[in-house]
């Protein structure tokens, strides 16, 4: 199996501009960390780092789900809303049965079911992802407020919170979950057939179809996975807050998820991006939020800054890729 | 009704080079007032480039354009338009939700102070629509109209400024028979009114129906200019295709006597295919022959489920007894290469290895779906060696390869899948001679190994090197089934 390199052909060369986004990211991270260190000299203590990771875990897990959808060239705006409804229904189920085990089951099932709604609408009915998931988001968050009357649902079984807030080896379950799903998602996307299909569909759906890729099933799978991740985060966030409420799915979270993906190198044009990149982006966005908090920047100004970061990265990506 | 008056348009020795490509060399075109000139040529002959030069879209590297005896140089489409040259494009350039009148005046609304003058626009539109014999209300939204009416609106738009030269670019490709005849009437009335018409089409019968002269282009240059009475349809085809390359057959004709692998009957798709029936046998290469626009590509796409079909029955005998299958299922049994290599063949940013692996992922992965990267790379290397693909290595992005090497990979990746049916639509388009021969040799090997191959090529010489029989297509129908002994003449006559 020897292929002779043809000396007349130029080897594919890596150009500086391909590295520019990563370079800028690096500078951004360095600046943030320096600021952190200036404000909070004990920022780099292990405890604090773990704390940051725990804060980032919800965003990171959602970003993993979003990455799959973005790679198909779509978008799922309904993830936070789906997470909230899953959390509310799961908590209600636990409260009425008194069983802690039923909660996660209901939450994952609700997440998957809502993912399936998006999947059918986009993959089967060929509707536009943006419109579909925006509608899902509205319907789901409306339902959520309607069911809860905007009141938090409390009364979780103690064993539920106890298990999920445990810190084996000093590391919270949430951080474990984030690491576990990052590894699984990265492996599946990089090394397994469904992952290869995912990228191919995002890069060239017509060529994928001819290359025997089940295009519709791949797209459906991405939305289902996003729904599942909404369910997973519902389980973790409910435990951390000690209650479930419609507020969990605040719109600003959608922005954070997309910001995490875009900053982490996931293309909004489809076909490009890594799960671990998105998780890295999530950590970065969390640190950024912390920095702004410390600097006394208001929540709303924070939104302005995050929105600007997304636009800047998308614009940069567009320039560098085309 | 060839007139002997002075030419109104005279394009002489037009040259146009693009980086790496010579699009036109000494192309000529002469048209007189009151004359309909057919402009014919195979794909890539340079018709579009020449018309783009005339339209001011691109400027030529050499040559002169004389209009009414004066030399002109168009810097932009606006210049060309102002000089009295008008294009009738296919109906696709319409704004469906706007009215007929608005579509006619889309690039030049009549103004009254700062507002559009709706009344003048309507009156003017009514006059133009009368001129082309269209009974359409100018206030109708275009989306409510049929294709034929839209085509007439396009003509009305072109007539807005009393052009001296009107170019019809494949005006009938999506019209029904009745709409076509209405269009011919309009063309004849324009001729009567003294306009010079350039009529571009792929349909030979049309040039004999409406044209006075025919100019044929081939390989970027003009090869003939004749009065229509001096030529036959077969002459035109011969001029368009040029001398067939004197390359021998790659294997002697091998008509297969085996029973059919796949049988198709009654395949129809509105506006593209009519009642197509064919059967393919293992071990034979069937050449699908027809001029551009005859429905070759449409047939392949319909068979593979890439375009929906209205009707038809496909029977697959691959598993012993015949069973009825859908086009999408048939696609699952076939190796398919479409004519659009960039759009439907390669996944450009991915490596050769990934592209080869794509249809083979089932074999290259474990039961749990983990891809074996080493085996994928081995397969890619084997494919590259077998087809002598030139690349720096299997990890090179396929988009950076030359067209011929890309195509070798696109075809070669099916070898490991071992489908029993191959549908190849222009697999050698844009390839150099040696790459072409490599691909053709591979096709023969596939047939020798027992595959059925349906092979489409617009180069007759190439088809004749491999085909074991020919299916001839015209206007979406299979009109003939010729034996491998058919001569070049037979084949050209069949489509003429």
Image (spheres, coloured by chain):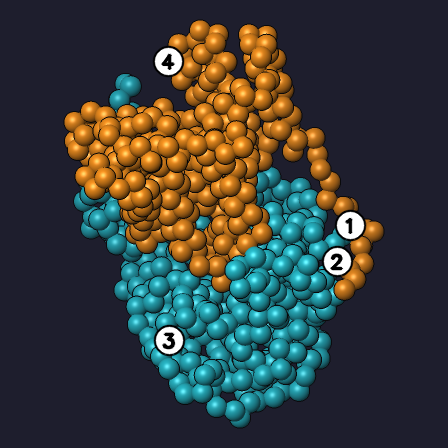
Chain colours: A orange, B cyan
Q: Residue at x 57, y 89 (%)?
A: B255
> What residue does disc 4 label?
A300
Question: Up-down: is B372 above or below B437?
Answer: above
State the CA–CA distance, disc 4 to disc 1. Answer: 54 Å
Mark in front: 4 vs 1: 4
State the CA–CA distance, disc 3 to disc 1. Answer: 45 Å
Query: Is there a contact, CB below 8 Å, between mark 2 and mark 1?
Result: yes
State the CA–CA distance, disc 4 to disc 2. Answer: 57 Å
Chain under numbered label 2: B
State the CA–CA distance, disc 2 to disc 3. Answer: 39 Å
Question: Up-down: is B272 above or below A8?
Answer: below
Query: Is there a contact, CB below 8 Å, between mark 2 and mark 3?
Result: no
Residue A265 occupies quadrant:
top right
> What residue does disc 1 label?
A9
For the residue carrying disc 3, how many other residues have a C-alpha within 10 Å: few (<14), some (14-19), or many (20+)? some
Image disc number at residue B220: none
Chain under numbered label 4: A
Near-viewer residue (A280 or B149): A280
> What residue does disc 3 label?
B325
Q: Residue at x 62, y 87 (%)?
A: B253
Image disc number at residue B390: 2
């Amino acid at each position: 199996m020897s292929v002779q390199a043809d000396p007349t052909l130029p080897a594919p060369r890596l150009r500086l501009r391909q590295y520019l986004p990563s370079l800028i990211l690096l500078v951004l991270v360095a600046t943030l960390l320096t600021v952190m260190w200036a404000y909070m000299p004990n920022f780099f203590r292990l405890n604090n780092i773990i704390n940051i990771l725990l804060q980032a875990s919800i965003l990171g897990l959602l970003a993993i789900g979003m990455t799959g959808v973005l790679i198909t060239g779509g978008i799922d705006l309904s993830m936070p809303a789906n997470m909230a409804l899953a959390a509310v229904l799961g908590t209600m189920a636990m409260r009425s049965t008194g069983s802690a085990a039923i909660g996660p089951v209901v939450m994952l099932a609700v997440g998957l079911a809502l993912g399936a709604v998006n999947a059918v609408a986009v993959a089967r009915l060929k509707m536009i992802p943006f419109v579909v998931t925006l509608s899902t988001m509205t319907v789901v968050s409306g339902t959520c407020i309607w069911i809860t009357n905007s009141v938090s649902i409390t009364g979780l079984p103690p064993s539920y919170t106890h298990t999920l807030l445990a810190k084996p080896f000093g590391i919270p379950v949430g951080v474990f979950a984030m690491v576990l799903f990052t590894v699984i998602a990265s492996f599946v996307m990089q090394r397994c057939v469904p992952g290869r299909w995912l990228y191919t569909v995002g890069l060239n759906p017509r060529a994928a179809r001819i290359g025997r890729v089940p295009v519709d099933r791949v797209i459906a799978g991405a939305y289902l996975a996003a729904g599942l991740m909404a369910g997973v985060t519902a389980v973790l966030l409910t435990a951390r807050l000690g209650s479930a409420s419609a507020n969990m799915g605040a719109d600003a979270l959608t922005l954070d998820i997309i910001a995490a993906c875009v900053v982490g190198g996931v293309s909004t044009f489809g076909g490009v991006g890594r799960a671990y990149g998105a998780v890295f982006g999530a950590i970065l966005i969390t640190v950024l939020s912390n920095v702004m908090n410390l600097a006394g920047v208001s929540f709303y100004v924070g939104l302005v800054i995050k929105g600007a970061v997304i636009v800047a990265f998308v614009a940069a990506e567009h320039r560098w890729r085309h | 009704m060839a007139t002997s008056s002075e030419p109104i348009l005279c394009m002489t020795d037009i040259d146009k080079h693009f980086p790496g490509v010579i699009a036109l060399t000494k192309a000529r075109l002469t048209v007189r007032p009151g004359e309909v000139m057919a402009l014919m040529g195979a794909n890539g002959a340079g018709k579009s480039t020449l018309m783009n030069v005339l339209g001011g879209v691109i400027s030529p590297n050499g040559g002169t354009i004389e209009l009414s005896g004066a030399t002109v140089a168009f810097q932009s489409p606006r210049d060309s338009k102002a000089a009295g040259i008008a294009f009738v494009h296919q109906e696709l350039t319409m704004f469906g939700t706007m009215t007929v009148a608005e579509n006619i005046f889309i690039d030049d609304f009549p103004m009254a102070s700062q507002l559009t003058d709706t009344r003048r626009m309507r009156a003017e539109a009514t006059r133009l629509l009368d001129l082309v014999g269209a009974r359409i209300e100018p206030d109708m939204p275009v989306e409510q109209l049929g294709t034929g009416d839209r085509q007439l609106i396009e003509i009305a738009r072109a007539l807005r400024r009393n052009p001296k030269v009107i170019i019809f670019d494949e005006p009938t490709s999506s019209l029904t028979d009745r709409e076509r005849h209405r269009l011919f009437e309009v063309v004849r009335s324009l001729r009567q009114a003294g306009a010079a018409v350039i009529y571009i089409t792929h349909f030979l019968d049309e040039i004999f129906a409406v044209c006075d002269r025919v100019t044929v282009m081939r390989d970027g240059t003009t090869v003939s200019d004749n009065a229509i009475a001096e030529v036959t349809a077969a002459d035109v085809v011969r001029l368009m295709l040029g001398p067939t390359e004197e390359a021998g057959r790659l294997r002697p004709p091998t008509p297969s006597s085996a029973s059919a692998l796949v049988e198709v009957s009654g395949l129809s798709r509105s506006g593209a295919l009519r009642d197509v029936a064919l059967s393919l046998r293992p071990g034979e290469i069937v050449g699908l022959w027809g001029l551009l626009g005859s429905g070759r590509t449409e047939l392949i796409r319909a068979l593979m489920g890439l375009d929906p079909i209205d009707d038809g029955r496909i029977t697959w005998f691959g598993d012993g007894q015949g069973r009825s299958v859908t086009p999408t299922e048939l696609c699952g049994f076939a190796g398919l290469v479409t004519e659009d290599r960039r759009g439907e063949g390669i996944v450009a940013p991915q490596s050769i290895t990934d592209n080869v692996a794509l249809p083979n992922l089932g074999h290259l992965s474990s039961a749990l779906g983990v891809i074996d990267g080493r085996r994928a790379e081995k397969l890619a290397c084997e494919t590259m060696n077998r087809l002598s693909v030139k690349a720096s290595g299997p990890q090179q992005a396929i988009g950076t390869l030359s067209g011929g090497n890309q195509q070798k990979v696109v075809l070669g990746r099916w070898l490991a899948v071992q489908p029993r049916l191959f549908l190849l639509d222009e697999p050698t388009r844009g390839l150099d001679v040696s790459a072409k021969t490599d691909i053709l040799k591979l096709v023969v090997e596939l047939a020798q190994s027992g595959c059925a191959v349906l092979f489409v090529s617009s180069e007759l010489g190439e088809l004749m090197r491999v085909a074991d029989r020919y299916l001839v297509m015209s206007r979406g129908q299979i009109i003939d089934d010729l034996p491998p002994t058919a001569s070049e003449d037979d084949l050209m006559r069949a489509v003429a």
